[in-house]
Amino acid sequence: MKEQRGNEVEGGPHRGVHWFAIILAGMTLVLLIAGALVTTKDAGDSVPDWPLSFGRWLIDSDYFVANVRYEYSHRFIAGVVGVTTFAFSVYACLSDRRRWFRRLAIILFVGVVAQALIGGVRVLFPTYKPFIAVPHALVAQSFFSAIIAMAVFTSKGWWERREVRPDVASPSLRRLSVVTVGAVLVQLVLGAGFRHQAFGIIPHILGAVAVTALVVWTALTVFRHHGADAFLKRPALLALTLLVAQVGLGIASYLARLASHDDPQPVEPLITLTALHLIVGAFTLATLVVLTLRSYRALAADPERARRAAEGPADSLRSPRGATV
Amino acid sequence: MKRFSTLCLIVALATFMVAGCDRYNKNKNGGPEADAGGAGKAAYSSKGDEGTVMGVVKFDGTPPTPKRIDMGADANCASVGGSTMTDDTVVTDGKLENVFVYVKGGPVDNFSFEPPSDAVTIDQQGCRYHPRVVGLQTGQTIRFTNSDPTTHNVHPTPKNNSEWNQSQSPNQGPIERKFNRAETLIPVKCNVHPWMKANVGVLGHPYFAVSGKDGSYSIKNLPPGSYTLVAWHETLGEKTQNITVGAKESKTQDFNYGANQAFVPTSLKVEAALILP
């Protein structure tokens, strides 16, 4: 357990919480894939009741056929992730004295409960499918990014002493990365809206153009002003790579959708491409969240304050804005 | 800047919700055919001068090749037997099956028509709907039966009527429901077996028919007057003809579909640029 003295935190990375967060992120990834398959296969309504499935918690093998396999597996994995998140939240609260960190752990658990309820409402009210399924997708991806953020906050790199440098770019990297994360979230809504037939494809294409511009701008800002700092350069490079893959997967997914318009059911490569598009999207969002967090960790608006913050062992553990890390 | 980006996000989400709710309310309020069952209209009584419209729905060119349905995900489907090929476009000797033909406008709009007491039945057999296209009147019962040794779910996705979704196990009795608003046509699907699709035409009057294997249809006892005759096919779209039916006249009106119907993705249509129809 970290020692707390006043508002200061003495300690370092917490291996246990860190690895627990990584494992939970991996489980969430599996859940995201399961959810993507449910949508692509149009399996969401194959089990019309909720929270039970055909009136039971555990269904007979007779029921476990065709699309029910996808919907029921999604529910089962979601249950496992929910229980694991509860355990993680308790462990994180008991292991870390940072108040905001513990709050984040609790928010994470509340988020997973809310997500389950949204999923249930989606099943029970099929009429409102697009308007419930889209928030469901938004919360799912946000949850993944949040758990990645928890892993970052407990990582060794986060706790390393580092010189806090001025954020010299204009607009500042910190603000630019926040806007980029916001744009990706909006794009996620547009993509999910298209998948669930609330929108046409055009808003999603326009969103892709905007997100591409912002990600490139953010990455170039990092390369130009902080190119020597691997702490920032690595996530920027990764975000750029993921963006290229994501745009390619998006185009391929749409072409596959057009090519299979008269198929009696979803077929390959549509299924794999759309699942990959969703997963790479989740990684892109998470990478940009990491870049944003790191930019706030490593940079400050006021160079003098940044210099003072860099002085002394106690201050080195403070973020540029004075909050404990 | 942070406040601005938060504001942008909230505005985007609010726009999405408002657009969505607007679309939903439009659907719930019903289109021009809503409540065509005839609330407030005089009940129709026969004058003995009704006519008939009949004809054949033809298909020119090479029909699309049926695709094989992979039913391997549920062994119970194949065990029943029957075709495993798609049947959305069935052409026999140049005649098109499963075209829903109905009249729109004209004298029938001024009357209400008592729905028949007998139900229209769709059976699920071999993980297919039989028949694939049916018509019924508002307030008439539609019955879904399950002859398969597997569980289905019956899920109509109407725009003007209430959507519902109900599972039906092998030994379960029929599901009986009604649609209270006119709607052409309501897609019905099984989410367990995604290839299962049917279409239900709901009208406020009894003047409709579905073309048979020989492409023929017949609408009888039609009050004399001028109408729009509509032919609707699941994949080939809609065609209309203006007709006038005289007293006791028997009118012939054929429809011609072709193989060169261009596919335009719904997602790319102009009206779907922002919100899908």
Image (cartoon, rainbow, N blue to C red):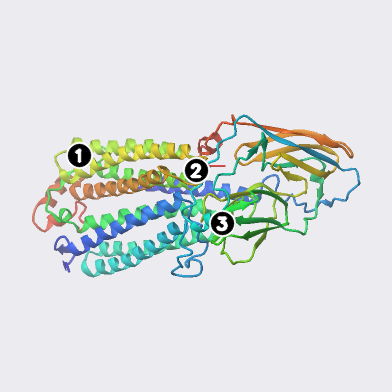
Instruction: Kindly report the distance in space between the C-alpha atoms of the residues bearing marks 1 and 3.
Output: 72 Å
Q: Are marks 2 and 3 on the same chain?
A: no
Residue A200 position, x and y percent, is 49, 40
Q: Residue at left 51%, top 38%?
A: B267
Residue B163 position, x and y percent, is 60, 55
The quarter of the picture where residue B55 lies is: top right
Instruction: Kindly report the distance in space between the C-alpha atoms of the residues bearing marks 1 and 2.
Output: 40 Å
Of the numbered discs 1 and 2, the one sitting upstream in the chain is: 1
Query: Label 1 amino acid?
Result: Val
Instruction: Kindly report the distance in space between the C-alpha atoms of the residues bearing marks 2 and 3.
Output: 39 Å
Q: Is residue B212 toward the left or the right of residue A110 in the image?
A: right
Front position among marks 1 and 2: 2
Number of numbered tags placed on the structure image: 3
The chain to which mark 1 is attached is A
Q: Residue at left 29%, top 42%?
A: A242
Q: Are marks 1 and 2 on the same chain?
A: yes
* Crowd class of label 2 (few under 14; some 14 to 19; many from 20; radius 10 Å): many
Query: Label 2 amino acid?
Result: Phe
- Report the front residue among B250 and A292: B250
Q: Is residue B62 toward the left or the right of residue A302 in the image?
A: right
Q: Residue at left 42%, top 47%?
A: A189
Name the residue beneath numbered marker 3. Answer: B80
Asked if residue B240 shows in the view, the reply is yes
Secondary structure found at label 3: loop
| Figure quadrant of the N terminus of chain B | top left
Name the residue beneath numbered marker 2. Answer: A199
Secondary structure found at label 1: loop
The chain to which mark 3 is attached is B
The chain to which mark 2 is attached is A
Which label was assigned to residue A168? 1
